[in-house]
Image (spheres, coloured by chain):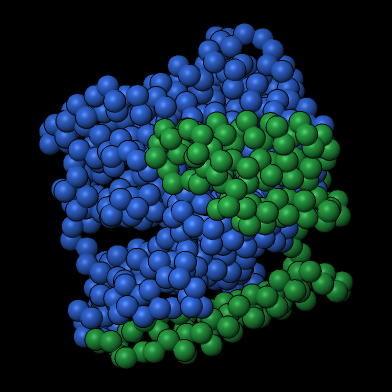
Chain colours: A green, B blue
Amino acid sequence: MTARPAAGALAVAAGVTALGLSLLAGALAIPSEAAYAGVGPRAFPLLIGAALTALGVALAVALFRGMRLEPEAGEDVDAEAVADRRAMAWILAGLVLAVLTIERLGFPLAAALVFALGARGFGSRAWLRNLGLGLVLSVVTWWLFARGLGVSLPGGLLERIG
Amino acid sequence: MDTLAALAHGFGVALAPANLLFAFLGAALGTAVGVLPGIGPALTVALLLPATYQLTPTGSFIMFAGIYYGAMYGGSTTSILINTPGESASIITALEGNRMARRGRGAAALATAAIGSFVAGTLGTIGLTFLAPVLVRVALSFGPAEYFALMVLAFTTVSAVLGGSRLRGSISLFLGLALGVIGIDTQTGQARYTLGIPALYDGVGVVLVVVGLFAVGETLYVASRYRAGTDVIAIRGSVWMTREEWRRSWKPWLRGTALGFPIGALPAGGAEIPTFLSYLVEKRLAEKPEEFGRGAIEGVAGPEAANNAAAAGVLAPLLTLGLPTSATAAILLAAFQGYGLQPGPLLFQNSPDLVWGLIASLYIGNLMLLVLNLPLAPIWVRLLMIPRPYLYGGILVFAVLGAYSSTGSTADVVIMLVIGVVGYLMRVYDFPVAPVLVGMILGPLAEQQLRRALAISQGDPSVFVTRPIAAGILAVAAAVLLAPYLLRLFRRPA
């Protein structure tokens, strides 16, 4: 009557179940010195873990009964398309680079990298122009937020200049 | 009379030059960011959070009021002109509004949305002004058991009502509850799920979750299925509506408001249901129902009004009970907590300047937005023309800014990245996002109230059944959760 559920959707159900089980295991590790009147720091986590485990199993059952998990279409996106992993990799690479560089090089340079790699994820290959645009954007935001509003953002080289 | 005096006092606060400036900045920034495709009100508020870190609480909430309403106005512009609803409540606007724009009546669609939003926002704010003191009086009689019951009701409605599937909504909710548990337990000092990572001791910041889910997750999703060449429809025709269009708009505005405010103000709340109901009502009452689906102005006027009235309504349970019923409200609650303030009846007693200043500035912000949006619409439209690589590059830059500056640590950028990947998966497999936020913010409060209620009753769980209000609310929550199954049971024999 129903086709086999997609592997990805089943993996999600498995992931939810696994998360629930690991939350349960983690909850048991919370020392519960039976606080006043029964409910200690452990009860709520146990409940959440149990619920997620049950919901994960329920999702798997629903999938086998024919539930489909499909994204809604939007204007910029083609929901039918096969996911473009390379585009995602560019964006993730930019964010990882930011994590690695923000404290050493400062926000403006790290953010310019995020911008250029993010733009590459959307198919723009004009590296120099994108880096330049990113730098303009990030220097202006850094100046506004760090200097103007006093938000803590490492400036890198800029801190020495101005 | 008390209410009017309090409101007058609030206007005194809101009309101070500095606060007027904050309201204006909030309205302008909220519109500008809200117009950007793919950025809904929740993300707008979260991205602009760093801009308010250095302000006084009153100043920053006045700015939030502007951002909150501004993002709603901006979002409808985007829906109408490029059919990219930034949040579920604008999907309906996109339905008819985008068709109107394609038929060359985009300007009229924008105008009826803006004026409708103004009418509904103002009436909704009036409703909020007079409802809030009543709710405060009721709330003062609530004990922990009643609060816990209300929160359970919010959980069930948010997960059962938002999105298409109860099962997926519930999974999202519990995911949020799990995120909320992370950190040091406030009552016993026990670390929970911190994995020994110091950055997790204070819990996962709400900004990280919002920015991760909405900005990073959404960017990854759009990039993975990117289809270049979205056409922005140029606005043609006069910005002013014709007499005929006025005639067809004013009743839907009022009906939308009448649906939006009460439903938004319920602890169940949300803006999705009233906008959808308003659409159905207008479709049924329309003189020319055949126009629906091809760009009927009533289908823009009604839902837009309902959406904005609901946005005002949502503030009632948020301010008086501390109960957020939408993603945006959850972020506002987190912003209050960031200042060490807990919305609820006591906030009205302890910080009248802040609360009434905030409410008064909603009136002012709404008026500013009407002025900002009607004549300036062509300027906002230019923001839609930003090439997508730059738009999403910029969103990522602001995501990093928001994540890093929330506590000034790289670990938070890593957490945002991880949550972003989860957000991508949720998008691909169609899990609703709002329950995550509501669960995450409301979960710790619900746990606190549960433990308090049981401490008072000395561990006897029957308090939830013997106290009539708590029992009643819990019964409604159970009904919301089980309604479809019960209906199915009754229908089966027939």
Left or right: residue A130 compared with residue B400: right
Seen in the image, is B175 located left or right of residue B227? Answer: left
- Residue B458, given in percent of the width and then of the height, sits at 21, 85
Question: Quick check: can you spot residue B293?
Answer: no
- x 79%, y 42%: residue: A120
Relative to B380, residue B309 above or below: below
Residue B309 image offset from top left, x and y in percent: 43, 36
B490 vs A106: above or below: below
**In the image, residue B69 lies at what x, y percent?**
44, 33
Count of marks placed on residues = 0
Q: Is residue B429 left or right of residue B73?
A: right
Whether residue B371 appears in this view of the structure is yes
Question: Residue at horizontal 28%, vertical 54%?
Answer: B340
* Viewer-side residue, B461 vs B69: B69
> Farthest front residue?
A160
The quadrant of the picture occupied by the N terminus of chain B is top left
**Frontmost residue, B232 versus B320:** B232
State whether residue B105 is above or below residue B87: above
Quadrant in which the C terminus of chain B is drawn: bottom right
Res B485 → quadrant: bottom right
Please report the residue visible at 78 percent of the width from the left and 27 percent of the height from the top. Answer: B231
Which residue is at the front of the view, B41 or B112? B41
Q: Residue at x 57, y 77 (%)?
A: A52
